[in-house]
Image (cartoon, rainbow, N blue to C red):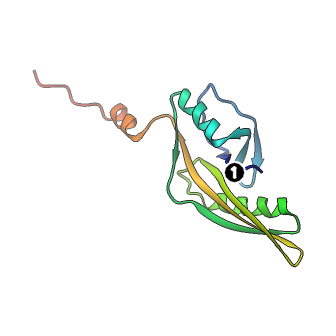
Amino acid sequence: MKLHSVFLRSSCVLPHSLDPLREPFGENWTHVEEIAAPDLDRMIRQAGWHFIMVSGAFFRRGFARTQEEAIHRALARALKAVARRCNAAEFNSVQVTEFAGFHIANVIVQPRQIRQYTSLDVSDERHPQPEPAR
């Protein structure tokens, strides 16, 4: 798993022009193959959508006999902590140590949201301004 990998909720809707290769990951998440967060951000913005960083990163730890499995477990735990309103997350940091034959992975996941509209755009569309009096 590479740093700045992107994870999308299984229900995440993307712009029609984007159809990245996704691999299932954990419960209700998919891993975007071969596209790092900065590149996906650029692609989403070119389509006129938004890839918003949400405050509140999640730190989780995973233990396993192999480094890869420890990272996988820590990532799965971090993704479970991401709020439902966030439909994406970015893998920001990993640190792996070994103790007594076990690998211990510490990961940080940054919640993100992919949206077609910003809140200002939505308010203009859903709440039209009253027509001026004549």
Outermost residue to the top: 134
In the current view of this chain or complex, which residue is farthest to the bottom?
Answer: 100
Residue 124 % position (x, y): 33, 33
Q: Is residue 130 above or below residue 68?
A: above
Residue type beneath disc 1: Asn
The residue that appears at 36% across and 31% down in the rendered structure is: 125
Which residue is depicted at the point 58% across and 33% down? Answer: 42
Count of numbered badges drawn on the protein = 1
Task: In the rendered view, tell whether residue 42 sits above or below residue 92.
Answer: above
Q: Is residue 43 left or right of residue 99?
A: left
| Residue drawn at point x = 75 percent, y = 49 percent | 2
In the image, what residue occupies the spot 78% across and 58% down? 72
| Residue 34 x, y percent position in the rendering | 75, 38
Percent x, y for residue 71? 77, 60
Secondary structure, mark 1, is: loop
Q: Is 93 placed above or below 18 here? A: below
Q: Residue furthest left?
A: 134
Q: Which residue is more in the foreground, 101 or 130? A: 101
Quadrant of the image for the C terminus?
A: top left
Q: Which residue is mark 1?
A: 28
Q: Residues within 10 Å of mark 1 (few under 14, many from 20)?
A: few
User: In the rendering, at what x and y percent does residue 73 appear?
Assistant: 77, 63
